[in-house]
Image: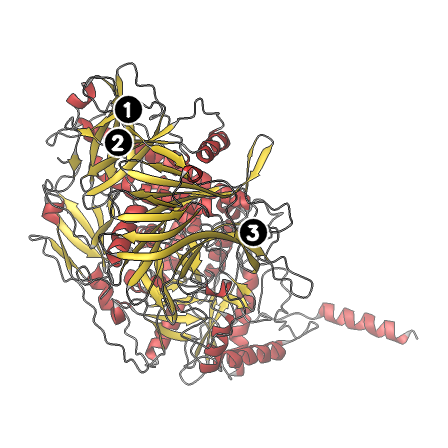
């Protein structure tokens, strides 16, 4: 019995005397032809806000929520790379890297520049964040990418080659061609696609494709695209962060648990499994995941060993790699690849789990992001007109805040509440600084002549950021003492614009004049009780003050504003003899009508309501002769709570309804407001759903302003609120949605069309996917798509279009009907990581209420083939509302001494109807960034889907261009150079006819820019003199 302990003591003593040998690991392996090459790509995925704020993630604060510190990651990675020149690492989120970079010494910066130059450290994607692909507008996606790319170019002289959208919850066509090919990327990689789609692609070895996202730009903007077989983390068993459970390689023969061959076998088995679903002999392992490499040596030590021993084994070849090396290897294989068109929406990761709820989640934040996006565009224009001031207010803070807000856990609405608050705070801080710039720039312009520069303006202008909730102190003033209100109206669009201005006023004795002193037709409308209640509560919540007097009226008047310029209007008290006061609207209720039919609309458009039912039932346009049965209603989807057997609940990400229920109007009658400029119908569907429908005399669409909330949940049911526009159109299940506010993407048989990030429109077919045979398990959630600009459907004679003021989810669940989801309040987390219910509340002292949403959508019927011009032109007006600034004058002192009208452009010149200026920005070095976007797809409109031209000499008549350089979309390289470097990919069985039309080179001596359908052209311009405003 005493022998065993003695032996154990002797073994231990022996082991203590044995000296372990140093092992030099060979990590220098490169690609080996004829073998399976396993490209190990070390990476970290660092969310720019999610469970913690962006700053908390950076410094490692609030670790009770999540142990994550990005500065530790970067510090650790740099040290680990220096230990072995063969090691590599990729980094993506420049918002974090920029913070870290600014804190480093010159010595550390020099070291990091060497790592970047040698290819050990590579910037991939390169935007400030990894933006979402459903909720952002394409202009915001471009802007945030540009900020990151310019930083990388300025500090390192590098241009990222690879798109790396590994975590967004579905992927848009815009990402492929615009934020991929058009920024100079050679490939794009991501992880999340529908589980049914992934299964088929693995079976057919079609996880890697050539993605052609734009019908208009065709193969000229296609991109090689790789989809990961499982997710963006390593294969099971190869996680090596501190405290991870994967067994490390124990290669010291003098120690217990020696496992080299076992681990090599595991590696080879995982490699062969992946190789069996991948074309060519190259596969990629993404060695990292969220916030990994906080102690980088734990990863690199194990990868060093894997490369060393796997290559000694010889069955497969392992190497340190990057997506750039992997892409070049795929290209060198000279393989024809399957072709992918349209997009990767919607995304489900399992049955009954469609990630389509986030299309609408946090609608107030989505609306604020969109509002700030348009404001930044206008503010940059005004910054250019005044001249960039190094010491004064700038647009940079707002640009940075907006960039971070595009993150896929920001504008998506899938972050924790305290993080959403942080994003909002950053946007507001950026707005405050930009507002100072806007006010000083406008003051400069109104005080200046066309020949003199701008000094220090004395004019004090004010704006109304809470005008959407009827709060505008500058307009709510008593003008009885002889003062008048000066309204400066700025138009950021490149064409002349006519619109109705609406401002709250306290007096019913008002008159409006234009800059020539001519009376302007105007109308007073009563402020609705619902609007007054929202105003008073939310002003207290946002500003911490109680408004004094609630204005009684909205003053409405038409404004005509030149392109990229302003007009001035004067509001005064109508006491002088001969001055016509604003016309008071006629107000009545449906109960007061003997006739059951109520008609509203003074122009071509008429809407007919049934008084006894209190609902809309007919639409008629006398100009286009379009007439149709027409209803609009509200429902709510009950959020599924989950069960023990099926725990999947509806939440911030997931839309999983448990039945839908009509919100039927009560006994409250309609209130009708009619006047010479516009008519309104006020409807109350429930205590928490109401709306105002407006029909303007001079317009041919209906505007619906909805108010939803607080959504009740005392019954234990979370609710997701949707509105339906119902017609008798025979749409055969087809509808169209936009692609991030750009292309409209078409969906077939049961067809409708939705936009892709506000750009292309994509054809959608209910219960159908073009890439696989869809198993329908969620008929509502599985047919929802992201909408940034609009959705439309058509039959044999007409088309119905609905445009939106922010990102929402939408669909056509029933033929002839369009549905938008407007608001969500849910009681359960959906188990996708955020760990928090989507239950937004607002508090004033101890008075806490569920969030109320106020927004707008716009509806129009057109003859078949004629709706595109309204969707495109009015879509620009929705995105870029007129900017209002206010001041007061005594008598006519102000109007007699200030410039009252202004346009950047030459007399009678404006941009073509099919072109928008999406960027006009003075850069740090004094050069000017100009982006021009064609608004139409090939074949979308018979008159406007054609080549357009822009004459820069007429666009900037008082400035001389000394240099004009066309650059990539993100401005980090000359476009000609980008095209020379671009990899050309073979496409398997490519039968698509390429009808791409693009503009050619531009001569600086005759600077006329030609732009083809869906093309965006980007230029850096040097003017000989740009600091003074122009007349």
Q: Which residue is drawn at 35% across and 81% down?
A: 333
Front residue of 641 and 297: 641
**Nearest to N terminus: mark 3 or mark 1:** 1
Q: Quadrant of the N terminus?
A: bottom right
Which residue sits furthest right? 1
Q: Which of marks 2 and 3 is in front?
A: 2
Q: Say if mark 2 contacts mark 1, CB within 8 Å.
A: yes
Question: In the rendering, at what x and y percent does residue 666 appear?
Answer: 52, 44
Quarter where residue 683 is shown:
top left
Q: What label sits on residue 719 in the rendered view?
A: 3
Q: Which residue is drawn at 18% across and 40% down?
A: 562
Q: Mark 2 points at which residue?
A: 522
Q: In this view, does 333 lie above or below 565?
A: below
Dot 2 crowding, Cα within 10 Å, few <14, some 14–19, many 20+: many
Specify whether 588 is left or right of 445.
Answer: right
Q: What label sits on residue 510 in the rendered view?
A: 1
Give the distance between the C-alpha atoms of the residues marked 3 and 1, in whole angstroms.
Answer: 43 Å
């Amino acid at each position: 019995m005493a022998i065993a302990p003695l032996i154990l003591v002797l073994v231990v003593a022996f082991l203590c005397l044995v000296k372990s040998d140093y092992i030099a690991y060979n990590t220098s392996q490169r690609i080996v032809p004829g073998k399976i090459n396993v490209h190990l790509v070390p990476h970290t995925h660092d969310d720019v806000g999610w469970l913690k704020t962006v700053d908390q993630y950076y410094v490692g604060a609030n670790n009770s929520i999540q142990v994550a510190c990005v500065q530790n990651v970067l510090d650790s990675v740099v040290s680990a790379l220096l230990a072995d020149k063969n090691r590599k690492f990729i980094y993506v989120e420049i918002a974090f890297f920029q913070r870290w970079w600014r804190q480093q010494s010159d010595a550390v910066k020099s070291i990091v520049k060497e790592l970047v130059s040698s290819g050990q450290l590579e910037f991939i994607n390169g935007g400030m964040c990894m933006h979402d692909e459903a909720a952002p507008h394409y202009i915001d996606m471009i802007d945030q990418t540009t900020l990151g790319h310019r930083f990388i170019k300025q500090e390192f002289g590098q241009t990222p080659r690879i798109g790396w959208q590994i975590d967004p919850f579905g992927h848009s066509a815009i990402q492929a061609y615009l934020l991929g090919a058009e920024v100079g990327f050679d490939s794009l990689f991501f992880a999340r696609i529908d589980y049914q789609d992934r299964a088929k692609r693995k079976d057919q070895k079609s996880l890697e494709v050539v993605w052609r996202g734009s019908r208009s730009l065709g193969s000229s903007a296609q991109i090689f695209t790789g989809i990961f077989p499982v997710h963006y983390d390593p294969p099971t068993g190869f996680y090596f962060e501190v405290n991870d459970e994967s067994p490390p390689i124990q290669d010291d023969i003098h120690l217990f648990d020696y496992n080299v061959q076992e681990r090599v076998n595991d590696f080879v088995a995982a490699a062969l499994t992946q190789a069996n679903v991948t074309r060519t002999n190259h596969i990629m392992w993404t060695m990292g995941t969220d916030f990994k490499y906080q102690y980088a040596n734990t990863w690199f030590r194990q990868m060093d060993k894997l490369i060393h021993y796997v290559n000694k084994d010889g069955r497969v070849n392992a190497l340190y790699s990057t997506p750039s090396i992997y892409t070049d290897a795929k290209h060198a294989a000279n393989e024809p690849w399957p072709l992918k068109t349209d997009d990767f929406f919607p995304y489900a990761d399992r049955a009954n789990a469609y990630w389509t709820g986030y299309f609408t989640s946090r609608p107030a934040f989505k609306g604020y992001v969109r509002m700030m996006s348009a404001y930044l565009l206008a503010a940059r224009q005004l910054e250019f007109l005044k001249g960039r001031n190094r010491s004064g207010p700038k647009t940079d803070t707002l640009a940075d805040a907006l960039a971070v807000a595009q993150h896929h856990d920001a504008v998506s609405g899938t972050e924790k509440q305290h993080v959403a608050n942080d994003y909002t705070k950053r946007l507001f801080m950026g707005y405050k600084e930009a507002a100072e710039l806007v006010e000083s720039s406008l003051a400069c312009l109104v005080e200046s002549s066309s020949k003199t520069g701008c000094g220090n303006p004395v004019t004090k202008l004010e704006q109304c950021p809470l005008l959407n909730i009827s709060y505008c102190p500058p307009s709510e003033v008593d003008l009885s003492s002889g003062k008048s209100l000066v309204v400066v109206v700025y138009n950021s669009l490149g064409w002349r614009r006519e619109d109705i201005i609406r401002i709250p006023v306290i007096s019913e004795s008002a008159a409006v004049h234009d800059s020539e002193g001519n009376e302007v037709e105007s109308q007073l409308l009563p402020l609705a009780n619902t609007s007054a209640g929202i105003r008073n509560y939310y002003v207290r919540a946002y500003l911490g003050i109680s408004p004094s007097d609630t204005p009684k009226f909205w003053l409405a008047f038409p404004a005509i504003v030149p392109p990229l310029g302003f007009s001035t209007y004067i509001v005064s008290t109508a006491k002088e003899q001969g001055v016509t006061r604003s016309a008071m609207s006629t107000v009545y209720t449906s109960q007061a009508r003997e006739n059951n039919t109520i008609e509203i609309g003074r122009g071509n458009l008429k809407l007919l309501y049934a008084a006894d039912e209190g609902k809309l039932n007919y639409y008629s346009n006398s100009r286009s002769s379009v007439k149709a049965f027409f209803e609009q209603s509200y429902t709510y989807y009950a959020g599924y709570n989950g069960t023990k057997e099926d725990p999947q609940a509806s939440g911030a990400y997931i839309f999983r309804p448990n039945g839908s229920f009509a919100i039927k109007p009560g006994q409250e009658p309609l209130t009708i407001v009619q006047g010479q400029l516009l008519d309104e119908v006020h409807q109350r569907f429930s205590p928490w759903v109401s709306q105002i429908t407006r029909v303007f005399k001079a317009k041919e669409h209906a505007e619906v302003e909805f108010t939803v909330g607080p959504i009740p949940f005392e019954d234990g049911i979370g609710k997701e609120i949707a509105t339906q526009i119902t017609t008798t159109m025979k749409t055969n299940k087809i509808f169209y949605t936009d692609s991030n506010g750009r292309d409209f993407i078409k969906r077939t048989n049961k067809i409708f069309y939705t936009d892709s990030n506000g750009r292309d429109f994509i054809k959608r077919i209910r219960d159908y996917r073009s890439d696989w045979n869809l198993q329908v398990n969620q008929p509502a959630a599985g047919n929802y798509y992201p909408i940034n600009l609009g959705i439309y459907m058509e039959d044999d004679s007409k088309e119905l279009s609905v445009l939106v003021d922010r990102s929402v989810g939408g669909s056509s669940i029933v033929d002839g009907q369009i549905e938008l989801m407007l608001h969500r309040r849910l009681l359960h987390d959906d188990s996708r990581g955020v760990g928090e219910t989507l239950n937004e509340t607002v508090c004033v002292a101890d008075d806490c209420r569920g969030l109320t949403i106020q927004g707008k959508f716009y509806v129009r019927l057109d003859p078949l083939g004629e709706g595109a011009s309204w969707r495109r032109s009015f879509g620009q007006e929705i995105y870029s509302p007129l900017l209002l600034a206010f001041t007061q004058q005594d008598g006519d002192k102000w109007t007699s001494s200030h410039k009252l009208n202004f346009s950047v452009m030459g007399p009678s010149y404006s941009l073509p109807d099919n072109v928008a200026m999406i960027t006009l920005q003075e850069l740090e070095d004094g050069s000017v960034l100009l982006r021009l976007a064609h608004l139409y797809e090939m074949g979308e409109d018979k008159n406007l889907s054609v080549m357009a031209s822009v004459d820069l000499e007429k666009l900037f008549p008082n400035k001389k261009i000394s240099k004009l350089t066309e650059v990539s979309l993100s401005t980090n390289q000359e476009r000609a150079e980008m095209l020379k470097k671009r990899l050309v990919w073979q496409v398997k069985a490519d039968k698509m006819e390429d009808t791409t039309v693009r503009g050619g080179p531009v001569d600086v001596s005759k600077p006329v820019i030609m732009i083809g359908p869906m093309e965006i052209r980007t230029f850096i311009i040097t003017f000989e003199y740009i600091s003074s405003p122009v007349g």
